[in-house]
Amino acid sequence: MSVTPPDSGTTITAALITAMHEAVRAAAHAVDAADLARAALGARNLPSVLIAFDALEVTAETTVSTPFGAETAADILTNWVGLNGFTLSNGGAGYVIGENWQLVAFATIRIENFYDLAGAEHIMVSPLDLDEQAWVALTFEINGVESVSLTDTGFVHGQTSYSECEEIITIWSFTGPYSAATLNALRVRAAKNYANAGVAWNFKVKNGFIGFIAIPPNS
Amino acid sequence: MLLGFFPFCVRSKGVVDPTQLAAEFMEASRAAGNPGPHQWQDSAFGAAERVQLKRGEHAWVRNASTQALTGSTPLLYEQIGVGVGSASLWYIPYNQSFAEVGDGDVAVSWTSQYPELVLAVCSFQFMRFDVTRFPGYVAGDSTTHRKIRAQVLLEIDGARQDGSGPFAVPTDTRYRGLGVGVRAFRSSVTALAFLPAGAHRITPVAAQTSCLNVTDGELEDATQVIDDPPSDGVCIGHRRVIVVGFPRGKQLGA
């Protein structure tokens, strides 16, 4: 509603002032969506569009000596060892997931070294590339059922001609949408695979990071 | 609602100018009718309003993935001599610049009505042969060891995003540092872009640099043309693309 100003040189009347007051009052009490400025709603007004649920810097070490059985979800969930500290579970209570929310999870896993069973750095047998593999998988436990997509698994090899291997693995994963659910835990599991014949070895996960965010539905 | 409006008012014993007085009201009306982000009280939006606002200002996520190792061996099949590799293993062409990973099987496409800020991630498994399995290898002859460099980037609307992954623009003829030389790595490449309204497509791309024989002088050697390059044993396995969009410029209720 526009304000009608008094004409210049005319007498200002109470009615004119009242009319202008009414116009301002009407505008202030009936803000229309079409009238909002382009940046009318800022960060202090709007709800979060991402929900940063939880994240954790992991400092616990794990020596992985569990052998890789098969590249199957069943083997991963049954036999691969859960890495110390790489579990987000809200202290065991889990996280309540809203209707049709989608989850994006991420983990960084630092593979520090390959060791022989005596604890010394593993002496690589091959003079060139090596066959030893350190495997990891990012899993979701939702409503009490743990699952994994093989897409969210991966590995690195031992390094050529070095007694030390230090590599970073990063995995981003995605799941959902779900009906209202509980994410009981987000985990990283690991196993070792392949080795030169007769050489026993383990690998060590030194530290890393694990976290996830949630994206509410579009409408 | 708290309006960002500060009237001058009429000074004591001053003369009331109708034009000035009218301007006060017109400015108040303008502020009320076109509010900015600082003109709302902190309590302006309750729980119900915030639910409504989510519909006007949301994020979205899209995902595409391919698993490429199961059913075969995690090592490339020639290494253990049994079976065949997964059909979903995608071989990175040798020395042919960037090509679309998986021939586009994890590309994410969409059409937006509004400008958007987009975060894109490709998480993938790279692996290659042991160098002894590459063509031309002769045991005991170090000049026949092929050392390749793998490069992986994201491409947004046909534009390669330099800096999104392991790749450097070569400023000389040397190949070191242009990509990743290890035998396997599991990693993620990321890009952030502000995109206009319209049709969009995000896809990962990968390349193999021209490679080099391993010799004592490899630190200084330039790339070489090799008659029998390692064109078959360099692969992308598992791969997943996640795109999170944050719409902008969308008005409440529109």
Image: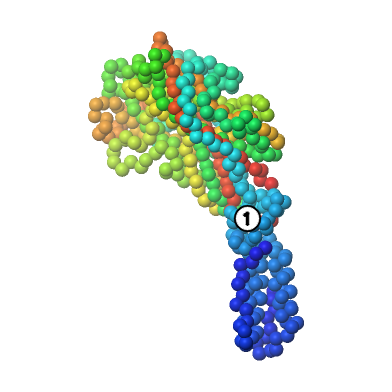
Residue drawn at 40 percent across, 9 percent down: A198
Rendering quarter of residue B81: top left
Residue drawn at 62 percent across, 26 percent down: A147
In the displayed orientation, state which residue is furthest to the right.
Answer: A15
> In the picture, which quadrant includes the N terminus of chain A?
bottom right
Residue pointed to by mark 1: A45
Q: Amino acid at mark 1?
A: Asn
Residue A114 drawn above or below residue A216? above
- Please provide percent x and percent y for residue B198: 58, 51
At numbered mark 1, what does the secondary structure look like: helix, strand or loop? Answer: loop
Question: Would you say residue A80 is visible in this rendering?
Answer: yes
Q: Nearer the viewer, residue B174 or A204?
A: A204
Q: Nearer the viewer, residue A206 or A46?
A: A206
| Mark 1, other Cα within 10 Å: few <14 / some 14–19 / many ≥20 | some
- The answer to whether B129 appears left or right of B89 in the picture is left
- The answer to whether A197 appears left or right of B227 in the picture is right
In the displayed orientation, state which residue is furthest to the front.
Answer: B12
